[in-house]
Amino acid sequence: MTISNNASALRPGVCTSSTRPTTPYEGQVIYETDTDKLLAWNGSSWNPPWNTAWGLMGNANVTSSQLGISTITDMTGMTVTFTAVANRQYMMMCTLAPYGTASEFADITLSVGATSSARVFRKYFPLTNVVDTVTYQHQFTTSAGSCTVKLRMTKGSTNNVSNYADGSFISNICVHDMGPV
């Protein structure tokens, strides 16, 4: 068959996010004009095409310092909750400014869900009160459903540690979907 006219080519359904088909069939594809998203129905939900990265899942910004951390402590505001999909690769990225009140090191831990927790990096401070920006990324997979990703900090041995943030320096965490495993 020869298609000589673009008007007769197969095209996805064109709609908005509020006017999606009410009874979609598995494999149906739509294009949302208000979100610029191409989505496919998998039998239970609308998702971007499976074999592509799905982009930003969530982010959080912090504009005030957290001081005097001595034990493993959830970093205030450094939490992202999103709906994970099975067999997807995710990447957490964060920018922090940890510092110590004396020569010390800080352990930064990434907690994925209720039970998975691992130290993702250690920052050593050879001098007192020197703020040094750290950017880190970590790839992970998780089970399907609601997932909470958070950063935690603890001191290395003796002296307390802190994370600096203010109106001009923002600490942040974000989670991106990188695509299928």
Image: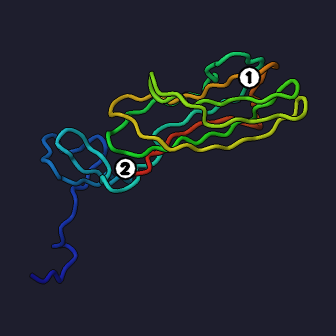
Q: Is residue 166 visible?
A: no
In percent of the image, x 46 and y 41: which residue is there?
140
Looking at the rendering, in which quadrant would you find the N terminus?
A: bottom left
- Which quadrant of the view contains residue 156? top right
In percent of the image, x 73 and y 16: which residue is there?
70
- Which quadrant of the view contains residue 51? bottom left
Which numbered marker is on residue 181?
2
- List x then y, in percent, for residue 98: 75, 32
Q: Where 177 falls versus 107 (above or below)?
A: below
Q: CA distance from mark 2 to mark 1?
A: 34 Å
Q: For the residue marked with disc 1, what is the amino acid? A: Lys
- List x then y, in percent, for residue 69: 73, 18
Q: Is residue 140 left or right of residue 20?
A: right
Which numbered marker is on residue 72?
none
Residue assigned mark 1: 155
Q: Is residue 44 left or right of residue 16?
A: left
The residue nearer to you, when weighing 148 against 65, is 148
